[in-house]
Image (spheres, rainbow, N blue to C red):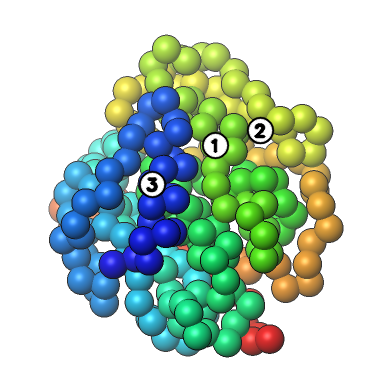
Amino acid sequence: MVLPPQRSQTSSAWSQSTVLDTLNVAGQARNKNCRPTAGRDEICNGSYGNNGWLGVATIWLQSGSSHIVQGTVKVNDYYLGPGASYAYNNTYEREHVMCQEVGHTFGLDHQDTSGASFGTCMDYYHSTNSTSTTPNAGDYDELLCIYDPANAGRTLTSGSGGTAHTCTGTGHLDSSTTIGASVGNGAAAAVPWWANPSESVYVQHLANGQTQVTYITWAYPLAF
């Protein structure tokens, strides 16, 4: 199971949204393989090895639609766990990765990938403080744009300047997409030299008609 403080904070933070609530329940997957369970997220952690990634989020889309039917999150304790010799081994990095990967399973993309701080766990900022460990108003707006029919056609804007976030409601109920998430313009803060691990996204069309989408957040390769 994921370390309780990070799991609980992530659940509580995303539940601040007015269109979803999360519940912490016993997992049905083993940490090693983290197999999915229909209708829920399986959240796993373990020392998955020196493979270069901090976290992996995978979602499965219903055949012929953008409806998310299940999701998994893996958090790599090789880099993030207690005793690891990497800069990511601190409470705030674990909270950042956990929050971001769970956000992907709800259909959210990043607000920014420059490494600057946008005050959200859906950015690429990595530090030893709580700046980017929870969702911000832009993330909650994005959930409204995806899941709330009352916002169909409405444009929601939060923040200002280089960190502003804008999205337009789709009008769909209980459906989701990872396509078209808004990205702010400009950088909000100086970027630490080590702070910008890249991310890869893989899409696989399965024999049962489902589409599997996997987000991989890569670690910077140096220990210090």
Between disc 3 and disc 1, whose residue precedes?
A: 3
**Marks 2 and 3, how far apart at CA:** 23 Å
Between disc 2 and disc 1, whose residue precedes?
A: 1
Between disc 2 and disc 3, whose residue precedes?
A: 3
Q: Position of residue 81 (x, y in %)?
A: 46, 77
Graded by Cα atoms within 10 Å as few (under 14), some (14 to 19) or many (20 or more), the crowding at tag 2 reads many
Residue 51 visible from this viewpoint: no
Front in this rendered view, residue 30 or 109: 30
Label 3 amino acid? Answer: Ser
Q: Secondary structure at mark 1?
A: helix
Residue where numbered disc 2 is placed: 165
Q: Secondary structure at mark 2?
A: strand
Label 1 amino acid? Answer: Asp
Could you tell me which residue is drawn at 26 percent across and 72 percent down?
Answer: 31
Label 2 amino acid? Answer: His
Q: Position of residue 151 (x, y in %)?
A: 47, 15
Q: Position of residue 89 (x, y in %)?
A: 56, 76
Residue where numbered disc 3 is placed: 11
Residue where numbered disc 1 is placed: 139
